[in-house]
């Protein structure tokens, strides 16, 4: 079991199942993809994902970009979706998960 699967199971699932190469079957924008993802979660699970994001951000404050790709691979690159960096993507993800 990888570190991502063990420490960040919801995020690992999200990146590998929703934001990899076949994302366009789910949606055309991050917002559409996250909306679809949320429909697959129970009412309490979005908060679990947000806690995983907070843990990840606090754990890798000095080297988030590098560790993001080590944990989740290169199938999703936030900058190619218009985000300034990984942290900006995670902040947007937290907002969308909270809605």
Image: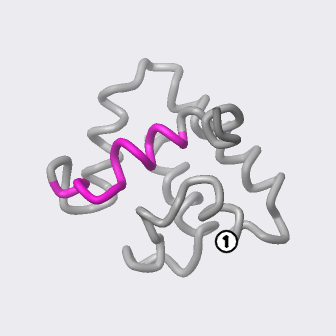
* 6 horizontally vs 11: left or right: right
Residue positioned 37% across, 74% down in the render? 81
Image location of residue 32, percent across then percent down: 25, 51
Q: Is residue 76 left or right of residue 59?
A: left
* Mark count: 1
**Colour convention:** one colour
Q: Does residue 17 belong to the magenta stretch?
A: yes
80 vs 49: above or below:
below
Residue 33 locus on image (x, y percent) = 29, 49
Name the magenta segment's main secondary structure.
helix
Q: From the viewer's side, name the closer residue of 15 and 82.
A: 15
**Which quadrant does the C terminus fall into?**
top left
Q: Position of residue 95 (x, y in %)?
A: 51, 51
Instruction: Residue at 34%, 37% (x, y): give it.
Output: 37
Local SS, label 1: helix
* Quadrant where the image shows the N terminus: top right
Q: From what the image shows, is residue 30 above or below residue 3?
A: below
Across and down, in percent, residue 45 comes to 52, 24
Give the vertical position of 67 relative to 85 (above or below): above
Residue 21 is a magenta residue = yes
Residue positioned 46% across, 37% down in the render? 13
Image quadrant assignment for residue 3: top right
Label 1: few (<14), some (14–19) or many (≥20) C-alpha neighbours in 10 Å: some
- Residue 33 located left or right of residue 95: left
Instruction: Work out which residue is located at the far left of the displayed protein and give it.
Output: 25
Depth order, front residue of 97/66: 66
Q: Considering depth in this image, is 58 or 95 the residue closer to the camera?
A: 58
Within the image, what quadrant is residue 28 found in? bottom left
Name the residue: 25% across, 54% down.
23
Q: Which residue is mark 1?
A: 65
Q: Is residue 50 above or below residue 24?
A: above
Q: What residue span does the magenta drawing correspond to?
A: 11-24
């Amino acid at each position: 079991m990888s570190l991502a699967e063990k420490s960040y199971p919801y995020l690992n699932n999200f990146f590998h199942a929703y934001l990899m190469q076949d994302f366009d079957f789910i949606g055309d924008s991050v917002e559409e993809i996250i909306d679809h993802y949320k429909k697959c979660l129970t009412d309490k699970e979005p908060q679990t994902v947000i806690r995983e994001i907070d843990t990840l951000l606090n754990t890798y404050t000095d080297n988030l970009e590098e560790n993001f790709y080590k944990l989740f691979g290169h199938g999703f690159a936030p900058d190619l979706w218009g985000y300034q960096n990984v942290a900006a993507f995670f902040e947007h993800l937290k907002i969308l998960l909270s809605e």
